[in-house]
Amino acid sequence: MKDYTELAHFIIEHVGGTENVKALTHCVTRLRFILKDESIADTNALKNNDEVLDVIQKGGQYQVVIGNHVEDVYDKVIEVGKFVNDNSSDDTKKQGIFNKFVSIISGIFNPLLGLMCACGIIKGLSVFIAALGLISNKSGTYIIINSTGDTVFYFFPVFLGYTAAEKFKMNKFVGAAIGTALVHPNIIALKGAAPLFAVLKGTIFQSNVTTTFAGIPVIMMSYANTVIPTILAVFVASKFEKFFKKIVPSVIKSFFVPALTLLCGVIITLLIVGPVSVWISDALGHLFYFLHDLSPMITGLVVGSTWQILVMFGVHQGITPIMINNIIANGYDNVICCMQAVPFVTCAVVFAVYLKTKDKKLKKTALPAAISSFFGVSEPSIYGVTLPLKTPFIITLVSSGIGGAIMGALGSTMYTMGGMGLFAFPAYINPKKGFDMSFYGTIIAVVVAMVIGFVTTFIVYKDKNSENEATTEKKEEDIEEFITQEVFSSPVRGNVIPLAEVKDEVFASELTGKGVGIIPEEGKIYAPADGKVTMLFKTNHAIGLKTKSNADLLIHIGIDTVNLEGKGFTAVVKEGDVVKKGDLLIEFDKEFLKANNYDDTVIFVVTNTDQFQDVLVGNEKKADSQSELLAVAV
């Protein structure tokens, strides 16, 4: 396994240091920080690191997108930063209501998603082989496999109790004990007793009172497989715990506080919190199914077309529990599950780009990203291919919306929390009827959406440097005739190479913008245009300028030279300085870089390329301060 110690140090330093980190979790592809002050994090430095796909600030979280190996990086960050693996930050004072909600839900559910997917795969496997007739659903083999997969869902209150306690900063084992009490056989048995009377008669919330506690009627509910009751129960219990910690003497605190918290938490939950939260769960389920019944096709269209955007901003974590609640409360979900086509459409679109492009660097990025999407992890495709290219991203959204609409129209239904991508299909098999339109409709929707995405991309997509061959040739012959905004000279004297030949994946794939590489002949960096210094890395190996046309220019000296920690680099200017074209910005020691085995290629890019009609690249092979290398065009 690769050693991520260096990357961990880099990430911790550029999120503001260990003292700026309040909490850290991770999902499938992202490190999810909650920072004390996001403004001191060096987002640009993180984005420019070739092992970071992107940085997203959303939902009260500072998300560093790593990719499929995020768990290894997470473990190393925890080790290097000496963090406690604690998802319990309550940093909500500066967040809005929605951000608070996303932060809480993410903290509670993220640690469980991997296990839930694993159990979903096992449960789906049992249904799949039974549907094929390989085993009977009455056999011991089926029951053992199915029960193993069902474990996390049946005892969900126990797992949720633990993670919710982490989030609400209370004793985690007391939280788990509260969840356990809700599924204790004796408490469950009380629901089956003869009803004393009913409440809310004639409504969807009608419930029986089957027992009493100290003379107080108890509305017994089924808490196995529930979501909201456990979360609210632990939240209420956390308040009790804080209160008891203040009043219980220290000599007996270690056992009296847990005892009182558990007792009060369970009693209050059974009397008030439990019934109310079950009614909330029922109301949510009815609301979504009401919308689905109004128009399954439109509901599926909306879910399918917006899901990737939700994933991109990380707020899908606030919606996934709705699907979980639907499955657990009703035994199925036919609303949120309409996002099933999304990873497959992404795979098809990215694979079409892979086949169509002549850019070797893009090919290298696209193929593994497409494979990753096929198995349900789409972030590498989003940040590495579709989003930077724009048109493929739009095609993905439209095609996924069509897939969702077809799923809605054909009644696709998810019966268990399945795996991701390919491994999610068994979750659409009806455990009672086997292969029905729920399963076939999902297959049809995914295939149709993939074909639409692939064909459209294959027809529409063209490499930017080949969209208009005649114009490109003219640009290379005389760049000035096409400039309507601003021309930029070379920041250093040397030999010019295409950006694709730079030995840095992020720069070479144009994730940071269009530009060129320059193999320097001297250790001096000059201003390529009039502008203002907007960014100067602490290590002085990179500098950013804002020009009069609002172009953001990045001049990055060498590959991985941030590791030199400033040795060999001397800045002549500082952040905020106004400079003129030709002004000396940075001096660096070429010989020192070579002696330490560092590539000294200077990367010169326009980082806000997408804000211009085009970024034009000249045909200069040899550059000096008078050579016009780049220009932005309206």
Image: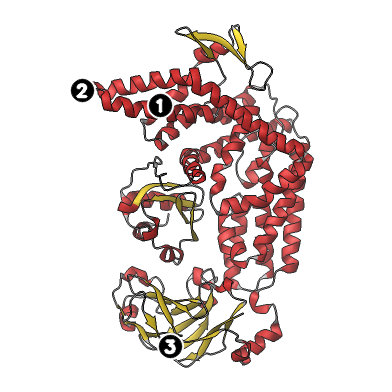
**Residue 369 in which image quadrant:** bottom right
Q: Residue at position x 53%, y 30% from top? A: 228
How packed is label 1: few (under 14 Cα within 10 Å), some, or many (20 or more)?
many
Distance between mark 3 and mark 2 Cα atoms: 72 Å
**Horizontal placement of 288 versus 10: left or right?**
right
Kind of residue at disc 3:
Lys
Asked whether disc 3 touches disc 1, contact meaning CB atoms under 8 Å apart, the reply is no
**Mark before the other along the chain sequence, 3 or 1:** 1
From this view, report whether residue 90 is shown above or below residue 286: below
Picture quadrant of residue 256? top left
**In which quadrant is the N terminus drawn?**
bottom left
Left or right of 410 on screen, residue 388: left
Q: Amino acid at mark 1?
A: Ala
Picture quarter with the C terminus: bottom right
Q: Residue 71: percent from the left, percent from the top?
A: 45, 49
Q: Which badge, 1 or 2, comes first in the chain's sequence? A: 1
Mark 3, residue position: 581
Q: Residue at x 70, y 25 (%)?
A: 136
- State the separation of the CA atoms marked 3 and 1: 64 Å
Q: Which residue is mark 2?
A: 251
How far across and down, in percent of the image, does residue 335 sit?
Answer: 68, 39
Q: Position of residue 632 (x, y in %)?
A: 56, 81
Q: How many marks?
A: 3
Q: Is residue 42 above or below residue 214?
A: below
Kindly identify which residue carries mark 1.
Answer: 237
Measure the C-alpha gap from mark 1 to mark 2. 22 Å
Residue at 44% in and 85% down? 530
Q: Secondary structure at mark 2?
A: helix
Work out whether residue 333 can be spotted: no
- Who's the residue at 78% across and 37% down the image? 437
